[in-house]
Image (spheres, helix red, strand yellow):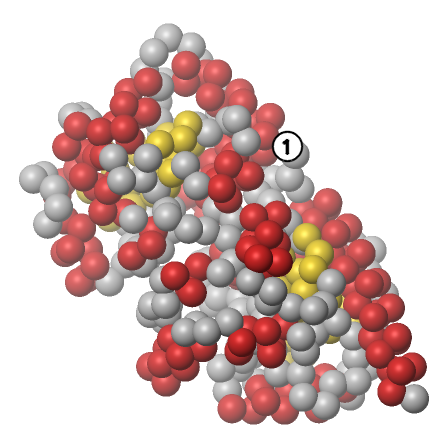
């Protein structure tokens, strides 16, 4: 199967969730399929597998409206986009689009890295569901990464197309922690600092955790950093990294007491399963998607209760409690793999080819 994979959402420095999702699927697919990547910046290749690629316009360019005309000439068996926004006018190929979550309907603030005009369109787009329906119904199959999101899509009747699961997964762990080894009193947060991530409650919880340090790992603006530091009497207990490499992330996971995330909404929660794969316990807000991903391996807390967060951290100091949480996390992480996700995507691609052929035959 000749799969043209849209890799234009790959970052040029460090992976974010979408970037890693696409790169990992490409790597897992390329062992058995003829995969060609579409990129919009040659710097993206540093974070992508060594497979053939073509250079085309940015997905944020006005030329995206006509990108199908360029893709038609490449004659793919099927095109896969890890987002839902790919231009499809005039396409002559089966298409799989991906919807990761519905977060921005309740939290319409657009990611800050987007250009201002795109942020404005983003906000308008998420004021109602009908624009999403128009986009998704342009596909042959819509993929999503969790049963939680699939259920929300059905609830809001977002598409008439088949919805198929193409799950997320952790990277293969290069290090698995020794449960008997000494660990530091450090807590990790990996994720953005948008309001729905609820990092404020996590910072407030540090008031009940003397001796602990909270490591904020992701890129952060000076303004957002100042807001979070103002919530604590001791800003020195916030270690602000402003981005970490994969190697640095592994080192921090190998030493921490726990990874903590109190998000009010997620499409998946990749840091949870990444931490579990290494044997680092996870403390997470008690929301459906985290229950789906973490199963009975995570410690769940009320995301509005800093004291409950601190209690969960302190429970890991009990004899054998940390080792048990570590063991359960490793077991849970083994239920996810990029090989399985690639098999799910192949099934979605085959279904898209079938759906496309049926629609073409009906048109005559």
User: In the figure, residue 30 lies in which quadrant?
Assistant: bottom right
In this rendering, position of residue 330 left or right of residue 353: left
Residue 82 location (% of width, % of height): 61, 65
Q: Residue furthest left?
A: 233
Secondary element at tag 1: loop
In this rendering, position of residue 16 left or right of residue 113: right
Q: Which residue is mark 1?
A: 334
Image point 83% across, 70% down: which residue?
Answer: 355
Image point 27% across, 28% down: which residue?
Answer: 308
Q: Is residue 33 above or below residue 229?
A: below
Residue 79 location (% of width, % of height): 73, 72
Image point 41% across, 74% down: which residue?
Answer: 127
Q: Is residue 2 visible?
A: no
Q: Is residue 257 above or below residue 46?
A: above
Residue 362 location (% of width, % of height): 89, 82
The quarter in which the N terminus is drawn is: bottom right
């Amino acid at each position: 199967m000749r799969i043209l994979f849209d890799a234009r959402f790959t970052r040029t420095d460090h992976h974010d969730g979408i970037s890693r999702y696409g790169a990992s699927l490409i790597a897992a697919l390329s062992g058995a399929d003829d995969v060609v990547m579409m990129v919009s910046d040659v710097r993206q290749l540093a974070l992508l597998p060594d497979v053939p690629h073509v250079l085309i316009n940015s997905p944020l360019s006005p030329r995206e409206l006509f990108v199908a005309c360029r893709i038609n000439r490449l004659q793919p068996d099927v095109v896969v986009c890890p987002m839902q926004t790919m231009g499809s006018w005039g396409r002559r190929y089966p298409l799989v689009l991906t919807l990761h979550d519905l977060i921005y309907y309740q939290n319409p603030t657009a990611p800050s890295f987007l250009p201002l005009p795109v942020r404005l369109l983003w906000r308008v787009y998420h004021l109602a569901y009908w624009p999403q329906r128009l986009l998704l119904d342009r596909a042959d199959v819509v993929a999503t990464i969790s049963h939680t999101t699939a259920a929300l899509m059905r609830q809001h009747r977002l598409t008439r197309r088949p919805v198929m699961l193409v799950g997320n997964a952790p990277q293969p762990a290069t290090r698995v922690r020794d449960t008997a080894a000494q660990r530091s009193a450090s807590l990790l947060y990996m994720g953005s600092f948008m309001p729905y991530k609820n990092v404020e409650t996590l910072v407030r919880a540090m008031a009940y955790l003397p001796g602990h340090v909270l490591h904020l790992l992701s890129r952060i603006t000076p303004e957002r950093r100042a807001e979070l530091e103002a919530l604590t009497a001791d800003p020195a207990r916030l270690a602000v990294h402003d981005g970490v490499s994969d190697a640095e992330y592994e080192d921090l996971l190998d030493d921490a007491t726990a990874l903590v995330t109190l998000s009010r909404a997620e499409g998946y929660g990749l840091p949870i399963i990444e931490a579990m794969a290494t044997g680092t316990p996870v403390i997470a807000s008690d929301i459906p998607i985290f229950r789906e991903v973490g199963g009975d391996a995570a410690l769940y807390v009320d995301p509005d209760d800093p004291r409950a967060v601190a209690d969960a951290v302190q429970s890991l100091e009990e004899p054998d409690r940390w080792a048990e949480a570590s063991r359960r996390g490793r077991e849970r992480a083994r239920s996810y793999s990029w090989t399985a996700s690639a098999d799910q995507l192949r099934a979605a691609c085959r279904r898209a080819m079938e759906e496309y052929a049926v629609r073409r035959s009906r048109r005559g």
